[in-house]
Image: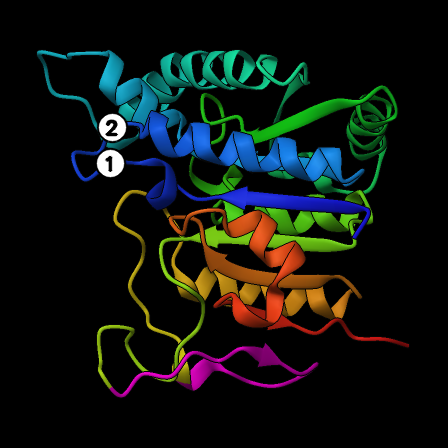
Amino acid sequence: MKRIVIKVGSNVLTRSDGKLDVTRMSALVDQIAWLRKKDIEVILVSSGAMASGRGELKVDHSLDSVEQRQLFSAVGQVKLVGLYYDLFREFNIHVGQVLTMKENFEPGEQYRNQRACMTVMLENNVLPIVNENDTVSVTELMFTDNDELSGLIAQMMQADTLILLSNIDGIYTTHPDDPQAELIWEVAPGRDLSEYIQPEKSAFGRGGMHSKYTTASKVSQAGIRVIIANGERENILPDLIENLEATPHTEFIPKTE
């Protein structure tokens, strides 16, 4: 693997009280720094702005869902990227923020500009940290979630692998809490897993396993390997690189011509 897009979901970065889990965030930064020492380019698609903003502000009046999304993400994105800046600086890694919207992935100038921006960042050893611009992306302008965004980024930047970090190990044959559940380790091109996908969304994000499955299917059809794994596992990223066969995950094998 030479270029990886890593998507970290809200359930990985958020504590049970809904606030940002700085300890886990620090652990993931350590692991990404390890990847970079292995000469692997990383693009990080990170959720967590809403959780960061919610933990920062105490609002004493009612806000509707759009107002909450705009307010908490606007405040939280600054704190989130500031934390990433401080954590990566310990490893002398420069980071840059990329806030995007769904319309930027339509063919045309905005698409080319966005791709050029991230390309020049990678060429100059800067790690792009990508998130949706939640302050202006509402209703029909929104991505389904950051799973969809990470899939589009992986295709735009011609990544070798997309890693979707969730709070479970991958796709199971039934609900993960069921003692009879079995982890599906490998998905061949074109295999339909819809019968195994649970409909519920994640506790703090807009996605869920259905979203990850949809993204993984599309991206693997485009020739990019996709791995769904548990971001709460200690040392998950190095283990996926060096000890994949022994590390619980679901891998979507890319379609080849």
Residue at 31% x, 30% y is 21
**x and y percent of residue 37 in the render?**
74, 33
106 left or right, relative to 176: right
Indicate whether 165 appears above or below 74. below
249 and 226: which one is in front? Answer: 249
| Alpha-carbon span between mark 2 and mark 1 | 5 Å
User: Which span is picked out in magenta?
Assistant: 180-195
Confirm or deny contact between disc 2 and disc 1 (CB under 8 A). Answer: yes
Whether residue 187 is in magenta: the answer is yes
Report the label total: 2
Q: Amino acid at mark 1?
A: Arg
Q: Residues within 10 Å of mark 1 (few under 14, many from 20)?
A: some
Give left or right: position of 10 versus 204. Answer: right
Report which residue position mark 2 lands on. Answer: 19
**Label for residue 15?**
1
Scheme by which the image is coloured: rainbow
